Amino acid sequence: MTRVGIVCDSTCDLGPEWLAQHSVMMVPLKVLFDSDSYLDWIDLSPDAFYSKLAASSVLPKTSQPSPADFAAVYARLAEAGCTEIVSIHLTSALSGTFESATLAAVNSPVPIRIVDTKTVSMATALAIRAAVEARDMGGSATEVESAAREVAESSHFYFILDTLDYLVKGGRAGKASGLAASVLNIKPILTFTPEGTIEPFKKVKGLKKAFAALAAQVAADSPGVRLRLSVLHGAAPELADQMLAALDGAGVDYELVMIGSVGAVIGTYAGPGAVGLAYYPMS
């Protein structure tokens, strides 16, 4: 009988507790403050990270897992009896994590199916959740992989940053690098391209109007359709509440999967005060 293992990286922002409860193995990325290195979500919780970020004069850097890191996890799952593995990761356009997973798969003792979600954080988390549901229903590796890919491809991910400074300084701004977010209280709404890079969606003056514009877009995306939706925030749970209130005000029909914190790696580029949502239509 086929036993399917599921692997992810820490940028899904699901956290070790949820992943352990659902038998998903997580390979962490690293966050570096000067010479000090921390494993995302392992050595550094979101709360600890944002406190450290506020107190640091140095912008942290991030580092992807090595192929050896993935190989060790793949071998552990094979030893535990998994006959195939589905490995689900953040966009390859912004990180070498997908490449490390791919290199590790070459010499794996069992077949590895690797999914590039072309996105990050809660949007990647939705794909992982779909994979878990498929596996727990007795799905084959093909079905588990397909469930993850279908959700990743049908998902929308929008986010609002308090400042673009972290994204620009970290070199991940892409087409959004020219936006003057701090001028006149402009709040850019950003999204991901189908290729997995960041691009501006809309510029709005003021956070309240940004929430309204984003809620209107979600409503326009889903006329008469119920959504499966997650909200994320960077050390700002009150903003997540305001986002949900805006969705309710716009009449969006959704099932709330979770409200999650942005972890240290994604938070390095999003900064504190980020808020966003990921969703896909329920079949």
Image (cartoon, rainbow, N blue to C red):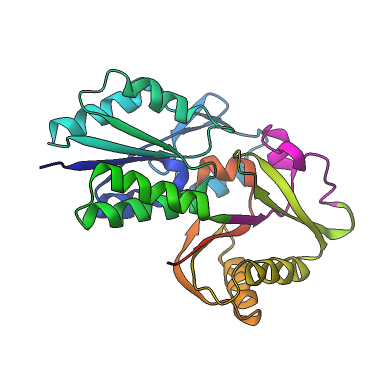
Q: Is residue 204 visible?
A: yes
> Please, is residue 10 above or below residue 204 in the view?
above
**120 or 239, which lies in front?**
120
Which residue extends farthest top? 107
Q: Nearer the viewer, residue 83 or 223?
A: 223
Q: Position of residue 184 (x, y in %)?
A: 89, 58
> Residue placed at 58% from the left, 32% from the top?
93
Relative to 128, say whether 166 is above or below: above
Q: Examine the structure image and report whether residue 178 is included in the region drawn in magenta.
A: yes
Q: Give the magenta-colored segment's residue range.
A: 157-182
Q: Does residue 251 appear left or right of residue 67 in this picture?
A: right
* Quadrant of the image occupied by residue 8: top left
Tell me the quarter of the picture where residue 100 sits: top left
Q: Give above or below for 98 relative to 183.
A: above
Mark yes or no: residue 274 visible.
no
Taking the image as shown, residue 46 lies to the left or right of residue 252, namely: left
Residue drawn at (61%, 77%) of the image: 245
Image spot of residue 143 (x, y percent): 29, 48
Q: Residue placed at 52% from the left, 54% from the top?
A: 154
* Place of residue 32 in the rendered image (x, y in percent of width and height, measured from the top left): 53, 30
Residue placed most toward the observer, 239 or 96:
96
